[in-house]
Image (cartoon, rainbow, N blue to C red):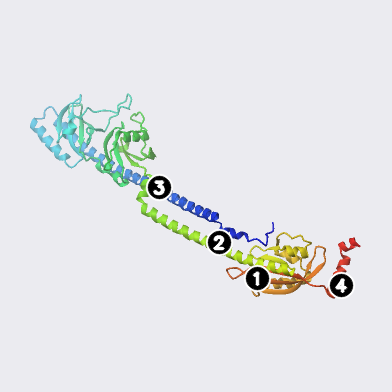
């Protein structure tokens, strides 16, 4: 539908408060979505960083645990023959005391604190080194895995107290037979391996498991503890199966998360032990609280950008409204003047190249039927071919900004096919940028005279409408 030249342009609707509030709401939603995206990215980054720190701790702990196990085995390898010789039947009490002193001295720089020699029923025959009181009640016969079925599989490490573990070893006696021993470890044994979890941040827990999935030693962050629930969680993740000597106890390396906790497990001593680390998955609130300064800074910058963007948009709307209002006022004045002078008005928008005709123009040049909005080339096609080049040059001078006002005579084709000469006056209306935005053309019919009248009559005689009338 052709715009009504008596009503304000559609651009004035930019001042609608509902539209302004809608724009503000959309912009605010964009800021909120941006903040949510920032939080999501921060959570993903922190979660990945926490898991990587725990994996690094597990790698360091595995190396430390293997090294500690090697030191324990080396201490047992050196002292076991001396203890076996000291337990011979022909050894005097004096020689036994000397052997005990020698073993104690040899163990002073190792993770082993004392050695208990056991009989076949688990009774203690002799002790080498200072046996701690908390380990006495935990000493037991050489045990085997409860998951090995009918085939015995000895356990290297077992817990003997809350803070200590025992390492089982058998030595061959000179006269034949085997002598079972349990090497009681110091309370700090495997401490370096377990405390490697401290590099993973707060909330970490670590434990050393034997082949039966029993916790041999554990450690944790201050205020935390490695609980039975943690042990069950690690055991379920490792997935120990019934063992035989030719089977592997559990995966050599395990990484993952379950029940809101990260888990990293590594095999130790060729799969005879496993060390596992647990860490809490960081919560959204924890991450936001840790980055509250960044979050507040981002929120402040986002709100400032929102205010600036809205101001720029609304200023552009006001500029467009003002430009449309200026154009409307010019057209309204032209329409009023043309109505008084019985002239037609053509409104040519340079932004989209559309041309709109007034009702007066339609009455004078189109039998009262106002054409729909047309392109510039449609209007040019209505001009007499002999006038088109001059008209184009005149219009181009206005488009280029060389002239603002024009006045010339052109011939326009009527619906009947006849040509009528008109006096056309035009004015270029500049936008806020100073460039032509619209061209308003006012056309007034000229009285026919002389050769023009003769040409009109000749055209009338040759026209189809005249022939039919005749």
Q: Name the spot of residue 448 as percent of width and height, x first.
A: 82, 73
Which callout, 1 or 3, points to the residue nearer the camera? Answer: 1
Q: Is residue 292 left or right of residue 28?
A: left
How packed mark 1 is, by other alpha carbons closer than 10 Å (few <14, some 14-19, many 20 or more), is many
Q: Earlier in the sequence, mark 2 or mark 3?
A: 3
Which residue is disc 2 drawn over? 317
- Location of the N terminus by quadrant is bottom right
Which callout, 2 or 3, points to the residue nearer the camera? Answer: 2
Q: Do callouts 4 and 1 mark residues in contact (Cβ within 8 Å)? A: no
Which residue is disc 1 drawn over? 428
How packed mark 4 is, by other alpha carbons closer than 10 Å (few <14, some 14-19, many 20 or more), is few
- Location of residue 384 by image quarter: bottom right
How packed mark 2 is, by other alpha carbons closer than 10 Å (few <14, some 14-19, many 20 or more), is some
Q: Earlier in the sequence, mark 2 or mark 1?
A: 2
Q: Secondary structure at mark 3?
A: helix
Which residue is disc 3 drawn over? 43
Q: Do callouts 2 and 4 mark residues in contact (Cβ within 8 Å)? A: no
Q: Residue at x 43, y 48 (%)?
A: 40
- Location of residue 302 by image quarter: bottom left
Compared to 58, does 348 lie above or below? below
Q: Earlier in the sequence, mark 2 or mark 4?
A: 2
User: Label 2 to label 4, Cα distance in Å?
Assistant: 54 Å
User: Label 1 to label 3, Cα distance in Å?
Assistant: 59 Å
User: Label 2 to label 3, Cα distance in Å?
Assistant: 40 Å
Q: Residue furthest right?
A: 470
Compared to 459, does 180 lie above or below? above
Q: Secondary structure at mark 1?
A: strand
């Amino acid at each position: 539908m052709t715009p009504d030249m008596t009503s304000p342009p559609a651009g004035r609707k930019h001042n609608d408060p509902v539209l302004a509030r809608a724009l503000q709401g959309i912009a605010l939603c964009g800021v909120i979505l941006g903040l949510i995206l920032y939080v999501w990215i921060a959570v993903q980054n922190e979660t990945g960083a926490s898991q990587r720190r725990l994996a690094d701790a597990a790698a360091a702990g595995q190396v430390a645990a293997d090294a500690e196990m090697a030191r324990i085995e080396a201490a047992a390898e050196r002292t076991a023959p001396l203890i076996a010789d000291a337990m011979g039947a022909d050894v005097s009490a004096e020689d036994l005391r000397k052997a005990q002193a020698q073993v104690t001295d040899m163990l002073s720089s190792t993770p082993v604190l004392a050695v208990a020699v056991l009989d076949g029923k688990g009774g203690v025959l002799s002790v080498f080194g200072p046996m701690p009181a908390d380990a006495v009640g935990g000493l037991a016969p050489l045990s085997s895995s409860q998951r090995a079925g009918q085939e015995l599989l000895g356990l290297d490490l077992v817990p003997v107290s809350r803070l200590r573990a025992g390492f089982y070893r058998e030595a061959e006696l000179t006269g034949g037979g085997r002598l079972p021993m349990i090497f009681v470890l110091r309370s700090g044994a495997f401490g370096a391996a377990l405390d490697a979890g401290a590099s993973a941040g707060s909330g970490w827990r670590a434990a050393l498991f034997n082949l039966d999935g029993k916790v041999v030693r554990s450690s944790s962050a201050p205020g935390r503890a490695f609980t039975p629930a943690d042990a069950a969680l690690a055991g379920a993740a490792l997935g120990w199966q019934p063992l035989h000597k030719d089977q592997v106890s559990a995966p050599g390396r395990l990484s993952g998360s379950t029940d809101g906790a990260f888990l990293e497990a590594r095999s130790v001593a060729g799969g005879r032990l496993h060390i596992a680390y647990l860490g809490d998955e960081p919560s959204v609130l924890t991450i936001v609280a840790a980055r509250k300064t960044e979050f507040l800074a981002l929120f402040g910058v986002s709100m400032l950008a929102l205010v600036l963007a809205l101001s720029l948009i609304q200023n552009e709307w006001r500029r467009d409204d003002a430009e449309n209002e200026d154009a409307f006022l010019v057209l309204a004045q032209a329409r009023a003047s043309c109505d008084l002078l019985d002239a037609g008005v053509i409104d040519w928008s340079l932004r989209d190249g559309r041309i709109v005709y007034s009702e007066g123009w339609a009455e004078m040049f189109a039998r009262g039927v106002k054409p729909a909005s047309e392109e510039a080339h449609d209007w040019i096609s209505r001009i007499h071919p002999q006038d088109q080049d001059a008209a184009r040059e005149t219009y181009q001078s206005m488009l280029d900004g060389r002239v603002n006002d024009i006045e010339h005579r052109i011939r326009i084709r009527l619906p009947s096919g006849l040509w009528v000469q008109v006096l056309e006056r035009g004015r270029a209306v500049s936008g806020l940028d100073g460039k032509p935005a619209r061209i308003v053309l006012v056309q007034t019919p000229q009285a026919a005279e002389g050769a023009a009248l003769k040409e009109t009559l000749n055209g009338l005689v040759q026209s189809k409408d005249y022939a039919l009338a005749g």
